[in-house]
Amino acid sequence: MPDEILSIFPEINEIKDATLRSKTAATWTAAMKRSTLSYDDLRTMPFTLLVSNVNVTFVEHVRTVCKMCIACWDVLQKAYGDRNVVDRDILVAGAMLADVGKVLEFTKKDGQFVKSEHGRLLRHPFSGVGLCWEQGLPESVIHVVAMHSKEAAGGKRTPEGIVLHHADFIDFELVGG
């Protein structure tokens, strides 16, 4: 696994299954190879272009949403034990990859982050699904990526998809979305 990805997103190490952890990191690496953005751009770009004057970075958002998902899983596990139906590894991998498509949706022009031509045609959930599919991630993780945003409104989410969707929108709406 590339050290750069793990230094930016240390929560990937929360995935216990080594294969899933490796494929999650590999998806980020593949995305960055296709992106016009640098690793430094990930650290400074806003997590959304849908809200003006966002003061939350992309990395902060991804990591915060993942941490919220882990906290939800911990509460559910403590409350329900063996009856907890949320798979922690699928949840964490999905949380770490939900926004991976944004590195294709965004670009930098004249020092500003803007929507790329790719992003004009395909929003990040669609790009994310493609990136995850290419890396051989399980369909359960791909589902979480596909179902996390508004494009999936009305669709049936898995338990992991439900947790991620709500954690993502908590963070998004608190920022003014």
Image: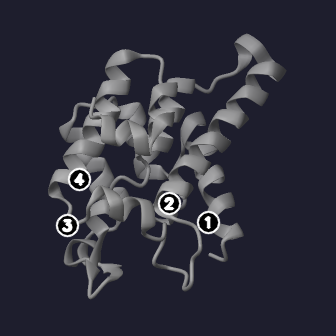
**Residue receiving disc 2:** 149
Q: Could you tell me how far apart the alpha carbons at marks 4 and 2 are, in whole angstroms? A: 21 Å
- Looking at the rendered image, the disc whose residue lies closer to the viewer, 1 or 4, is 4
Identify the residue shown where x is 72% and y is 36%: 72
Mark nearer the N terminus (2 vs 1): 2
Disc with the residue nearer the chain's start (3 vs 1):
3
Label 4: which residue? 32
Mark 2 or mark 1, whichever is nearer to me = 1
Q: Are marks 1 and 4 in contact (CB under 8 Å)?
A: no
Mark 3 — residue? 36
Instruction: Kindly report the distance in space between the C-alpha atoms of the residues bearing marks 3 and 2.
Output: 23 Å
Dot 2 falls on a residue whose secondary structure is loop
Question: Judging from the image, what secondary structure is the residue with disc 1 in?
Answer: helix
Question: As shown in the figure, which amino acid type bears the numbered disc 1?
Answer: Phe
Q: Which residue is mark 1?
A: 172
Relative horizontal placement of residue 34, taking residue 78 as reference (left or right): left
Q: Nearer the viewer, residue 90 or 30?
A: 30
Which quadrant holds residue 174? Answer: bottom right
Determine whether, in the image, residue 155 is placed left or right of residue 37: right
Tag 4 and tag 2, C-beta contact below 8 Å: no
The residue at the point 49 percent across, 66 percent down is 47
Closest to the observer: 27 or 40? 40
